Amino acid sequence: MRLGVDVGGTFTDLLLHDDDRRLTYRAKTPSTQEDQSIGVTNGVRLICERAGIESAELDLVLHGTTVATNAVLEGKGARVGLLTTAGFEYVLHLAKSWTPGPLFGWITMDKPEPLATLTDTRGIPERINAQGEVVEKLDVDRAIELIDDLCSSGIEALTISLMHSYVNPAHERELARIVGERFPDIPISLSSEILPEFREYDRTITTVMNDYVRPIMTRYLSRIEDRLAKEGVAAPLHIVRSDGGLMSAGSAAERPVHTVLSGPAGGVTATTMISRRTGIDRLLAFDMGGTSTDVSVIIDGKPIISRSTKVGSFPAKVPTLDVRSVGAGGGSIAEVGELTNSLRVGPRSAGAMPGPVAYQRGGTEPTVSDANVVLGYLPPVLLGGEMELDVEGARTAVGKIGEKLDLSAEAAAQGMLDIANEVMLGALRAITVQRGLDPREFGMVAFGGAGPLHGNAVAQLLGCYPVVVPTNPGVLSALGFLEAEFKNEFVRTFIKSAAGTDPEDIWNAFREMGEQAVDWLTQQDVPSDDRRIEYSIDLRYEQQGFEVTVSIPDQLIWDGGSLDSVLRDFHQMHESLYGISFEVPVELVALRVVANGATPEVSQTAAGEGSDGVEDALVETLPGFWDGEWQDTPHYDRSRLGKDTRVEGPAILRQYDTTTVLLPGHYAQVDGHDNILIWPLEKEASE
């Protein structure tokens, strides 16, 4: 019994998978932003009731959380102290000496305050050079004075980030020992452990961010474990990393910076799974929730991994799935500008409370979900009849927008949807067209509570088909958590010229790092047969500012040999990425080892055989607004659509966790994996 839990801005989604019976159970409950653990506990109670099991029968709980992200975005993190090398106290202020835009951008730049203030920063007399040699010994007596002054000032966490500690962490470890003896209650993060790479700003800001969210994450994990224990849950809790992997709750409490994009990771992982099973090797993940929409690219059945991300105004150099987010969701609020008299949708959201007007939780401002209700795209009841919608209330709220623009309620609602679709289209173009990818060569997986509502319309604008609506689209991110592997990355800076380096030094370093990876997998209780370790090296042409990561075969590491094949791969990859390669010296930058621990695949019962017609799945016929006029529109129960069943639009496909809108001029067909595939009728005609 494995449970995936995804906390969103509006709903907390849960998916329970029974491995023995190959059955899944879904539940959605309102998120409780004041304390996410309350909503999670409510959801656990609900889904166990729905599955007819006791909470003690759960074997594993996998959780994606936005606690770390929200702490940074809202500026509500801990007060962090920073120990750095004397003379480098302004490392967070100088950052990369970069300002946005030309001169005008610099004049109007609103530079954020660093996560660790200068008041809480102390410069320690010591210095290690880039070769790891001690240039200036650590002044222990002076260090103790500075530590006592800083740690007694009320800081909640402490970051230690010294120059070149990535190559020689001796001074950082000595300072940590001193702090541990004198102030044992203050959590400490060492940059040589969080990010043992060169570039002092990236290393320092990433480690400071880890401490900024660490006390908050620790308290949250403690609360949720306590609440789950009171519910009788004895299963271990694992947290989803930003790169789609898993880590134990204890590891997440120590290194929460690796969870800053935890939420969207599940959807990308699930889209990758769908790509493998359907054989569609190019897919766009389109995850539309109540507050925002997250999009990403799957190529050759694999997601794109980025080595860094940005949380608000601050960079974080941690492995993340490459996800682009925009402030457009079902709860995005529509308003008319007073000066321009133009319609705007989002990024302001009604959230879970008070939510859209139709949800009857106190919301008064019209949202995208209300517009869908007005046009008849959302049925009068949701969540399998558990939530009744206020159709007239939604119409009144949207009608006020129409009055300001001299439009009917229907026209105003259609305008709201068109604008929301364009905002999401911009995000999809950014990850395809702006990167040289043709979206017409991709399919789209529409998921999230509102993804299937808008997927067909967005695909029509972008020209990407088929639109794939999976079996459990509303809780797909939670399903993705169940498909995630345990994962951790180990890095060692290794800056040397390839020509002057003994390859055996590289292989020896990889072997040592491989042992670290094995130890970590053992700590996570991953069985030996489920372990996989991947090796790669960062290379660049001398004097380049950025690197290219090249995979290294295991056999080369254990058997030894020259770097010739690695360098050939680097030149080919550089030419593939940038259209050019050079005959100049190549420089080694960093060695990377990724530890992977496989988890059981989610295996569901295959779709049943469907009949030639869809009459048995018809629930009711209701008015829908299509192409400027009201039309009788069939509403179908998705669960009664068997394999190969075909539905022509316009139509509404209803299920517990979402609603799928099938536009006129399109048809939907159920495949062997119980996915709905949406195509334009003109494609069928041409074939």
Image (spheres, grey):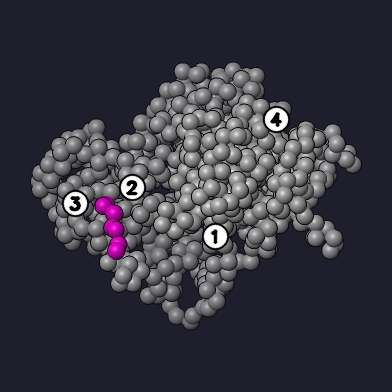
Region rendered in magenta: 108-114
Q: Is mark 1 on a helix, strand or loop?
A: helix
Residue density around tag 1, few if under 14, some if 14–19, many if 20 or more, within 10 Å:
some
Disc sitting over residue 209 in the figure? 2
Residue matched to label 4 = 23
Amino acid on which the number 2 mark rests in the picture: Met
Residue matched to label 1 = 426
Q: Which of pointers 3 and 2 lies earlier in the amino acid sequence?
A: 3
Residue density around tag 3, few if under 14, some if 14–19, many if 20 or more, within 10 Å:
some
Regarding residue 528, the answer to whether it shows in the image is: no
Identify which residue, 348 or 496, lies in the foreground: 348
**At 58% from the left edge and 66% from the top edge, which residue is drawn?**
433
**Quadrant holding the C terminus:** bottom right
Q: Which of marks 2 and 1 is in front?
A: 1
Residue matched to label 3 = 118
Residue density around tag 4, few if under 14, some if 14–19, many if 20 or more, within 10 Å:
some
Q: Which of marks 4 and 1 is in front?
A: 1
Identify which residue, 270 or 580, lies in the foreground: 270
Q: Is mark 3 on a helix, strand or loop?
A: helix
**Quadrant holding the N terminus:** top right
